[in-house]
Image (cartoon, rainbow, N blue to C red):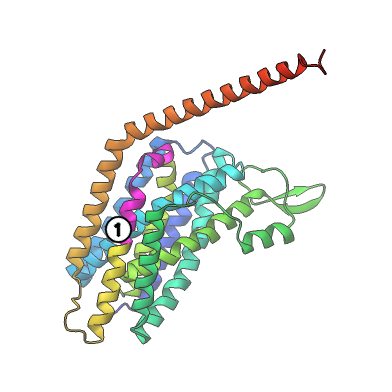
Amino acid sequence: MSVSPWVWALTLAGILTVIAVDLFLIHRNDTREFTTRRAAFWSVVYIGLAVAFGLGVWAFSGGEHAAQYFGGFVTEKSLSVDNLFVFMVILTRFAVPKHAQHTVLMAGIVIALVLRGVFIAVGAAAIATFTWVFFIFGAFLLWTAWGLVRGGDEDEFKENALLRWAKRVIPTSEEYDGTRFTTRRDGRRMVTPLLLVMIAIGSTDVLFALDSIPAIFGLTTEPYLVFTANAFALMGLVQLYFLLGGLTDRLVYLGHGLAFILGFIGVKLILHAMHEYGVAWAPDVPIWLSLAVIAGTLAATTVASLAAGPRHAARRDRDAEDGAAAGAAAGAAAGAATESAGDGPAGR
């Protein structure tokens, strides 16, 4: 797939225009909270733009490249749902006002898009030069999939070096000032906590790119398709955040589904590398099979999660009630022990 510089330029201009409209027109001139209804509307708009772009790829470059783009977009969109858990933790930890959440999320995603662009350029250059890079990408995806299966602190947010440096060096106010990134306090120009939140979101998303970028390279090695699939998946992530909201905890099997997808793509990358090195029995997995596996896995995990949701909710309620009862019993026992001690010789 040969993409001329002017196509790259037009694509980047179009993406920046969409981001500018979202950030400065749709939300900047509206101080209302970003409701679920508005999020649903704009989510449909973003998905429509992504689909329209894919149809354009089909029209100008054929079905093979269009399938690679759609496979990459669906994969990136699915993996980005995991980002939402961490985004929620970050916004809660920094106590970001609801009316400012859309602005800071969008700005953080712009940073993430730029940094992912750098990752994609480096990855594309490495793959074009060294076939053995596929082994590394494949092994990393298998390791990531195993980590998802084992479970862990995926919802935990830890301050990275960039955020710690920013908090130490940049003068920051204690309070927010609407949706502004800078403010003036006692005659001194300072940044607001929104800037720190934006840095936290943008830099944290780079960690997610460490598995999502190799994953999409397992579906297509075309840098243009890799970048545009990432761009459309990220641009709609803000709306997805507000749309899903509390629904993310109902997707109880999402981690297992993503683990299977990453594992499948990891094996696909390793088989591709072996095929390139002339191993006769190593097949080159076709894109249609990749699409079928990804779509089927997501559909199955979503249905299973929604079906199991009530049971998991009831189990959480029972655990919470048992914990409260245990706490009350412990408190009563402690009170009885104190009263008994007061009735002893020392008390008398």
- The answer to if 92 sits in the magenta stretch is no
Res 293 quadrant in image: bottom left
Q: Where residue 308 sits in the image (x, y, percent)?
A: 30, 37
Q: Residues within 10 Å of mark 1 (few under 14, many from 20)?
A: many
Secondary structure under the numbered disc 1 in the rendered image: helix
Residue 247 is covered by the magenta coloring:
yes
Picture coordinates of residue 171, whole percent (x, y): 75, 56
Residue 86 makes an appearance in the image: yes
Residue 255 vertical position relative to residue 66 in the rendered view, above or below: above
Name the foreground residue: 321 vs 192.
321
User: Which residue extends farthest front?
Assistant: 345
- Seen at 61% across and 56% down, the residue is 159
Q: Which residue is mark 1?
A: 260
* Residue at 23% in and 47% down: 300
Residue range in magenta is 245-262
Frontmost residue, 347 versus 39 = 347
